[in-house]
Amino acid sequence: MKKLISIALIALLSLSMVFAQGGAEESSDNGTEPIKIGAMYALSGTNAAIGTNIMRGVDFAVEMINEQGGVNGRPIEIVRGDTQGDPKVGRSVAERLITQDGVHAILGCHQSTITQIVAQVCEQYQIPELTAISTVDNLSTFGFKYFFRMCPMNSIYVENQFMYLEDLAAERGIPIKKIAIFADNSNIGQELIRCARIFAPKYGMEIVAEIQYSSGATDLTSEVLALKAANPDAVLCESYINDAILFTKTLAEQGYEPPIVVAKANGFADPSYIPATPGISNGIASVVEWNPDLTKGQEINAAFKEKYGLDMNGHSAESFTAIWILKTAFEQAGTTDGPAVRDALANMDIQGSFPNGPEIILPYDRIKFGDMEMDGQAHTQNNIYASVAIAQIQDGEYKTVWPFEVSSTEVQYPATFE
């Protein structure tokens, strides 16, 4: 009997040592073990170029942070997770990062479908996920506790287009009341139409035409003539790259020069757009998440360009910023414990610049996650101050023109198209 009791005591002692070791591992928050962040993007397949570009911003931020001493003396380590652009792969990668690699947070993804799946996995394991890129509105409607979105959602992009028009009208004393929409019949085109219907009345504007076309069209003459007949003060558009090029060329062929054209990025922001429309795209504007001529982030972009041989763009600037958000959350939590880091993100309020870090280089000056309502739908844990900038093609390159306080170039009005 005594022998059995002794065995039981030894077993209990061993078990207590296991738990003690677990606690000791958690207390290593004060040590030098790396803090692991899983970065989930398509690093192979058709979207690899996008993922590679995003990772430049991630790696650049981590290098800067670690050179400054890391997080309370602990370096940040990035564990790459290649989603291959496949939702099924995304789920398995997220589970591997958490259960095998032991990451303390996940940054991702680019494709909103995969982001939603990863959010479900993170919710299960109580590991925070921060997305810097995914914009589809409904991501923030599921009530996830561990999912946070830094970037604006789609409807914010569209509202910023209307805000730009409102500010331009006030600054120049010009009437901008009649709006036309030019969009394809895909989901993303329909999103522009849906959001424009919400925001036009809010900003005292009227939609006088909704011109839709089939993506991949070979002729847009009738659509452009319909726009011309509507005679709007401004055109808001959403097109993939080939359609954006054809639309611009058709404007020139039909001699129609709308005074204002503002695209919701997409094909108009593609690097091949301006070279394919030399001269005739001058004056067209587009939403951008970041641009090299913004008055903010110039020193950071210079160092980035020296390292990588190219400027930051919207995605790399956003992923750079997201790493600094996670660094701040770990510091404020004082631990890598998932629920504590989640609470630090939920209570975070960064204004102007990060603690012991750079200024917020994006077009806004404050980062705070909170709840909001959009068109009667509740959204949780979005960055409520997130916004975008507007850049206009002038002399064959995009130049930031709005918000006026972060731009150094004046809007060309009306658009020149030459």
Image: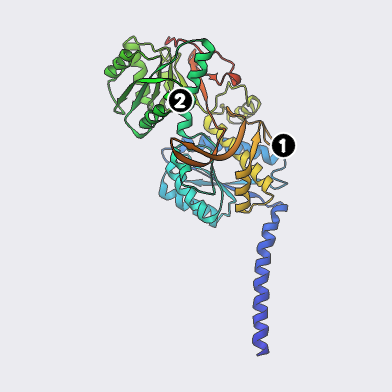
Q: Nearer the viewer, mark 1 or mark 2?
A: 2
Q: Quadrant of the C terminus?
A: top left
Instruction: Find disc 2 in the rendering and name its residue.
Output: 202
Bin the neighbour count of mark 1 within 10 Å (Cα to Cα): few under 14, some 14-19, many 20 and up: few
Q: Are marks 1 and 2 in contact (CB under 8 Å)?
A: no
Q: Position of residue 164 (x, y in %)?
A: 50, 20
Residue at 36% from the left image edge and 30% from the top image edge: 189
Residue 321, numbered label: none
Height in image: 12 above or below 218? below
The amino acid type, in three-letter code, at marker 1 is Asn
Residue at 29% from the left image edge and 14% from the top image edge: 225
Task: Find residue 417 and report its image quarter.
Answer: top left
Q: Earlier in the sequence, mark 1 or mark 2?
A: 2
Bin the neighbour count of mark 2 within 10 Å (Cα to Cα): few under 14, some 14-19, many 20 and up: few
Task: Find residue 248 and report its image quarter.
Answer: top left
Which color scheme did the rendering employ for the protein? rainbow
The amino acid type, in three-letter code, at marker 2 is Lys
Q: Which element carries disc 2, helix, strand or loop?
A: helix
Q: Position of residue 345 (x, y in %)?
A: 61, 44
Residue farthest toward the bottom in the current orientation of the protein: 1
Q: Quadrant of the N terminus?
A: bottom right
Residue 356, numbered label: 1
Task: Look at the image and tell me whether residue 203 can be seen.
Answer: yes
Gap in Å between the C-alphas at discs 1 and 2? 40 Å
Residue at 39% from the left image edge and 20% from the top image edge: 206
Height in image: 294 above or below 369? above
Q: Position of residue 306 (x, y in %)?
A: 62, 28
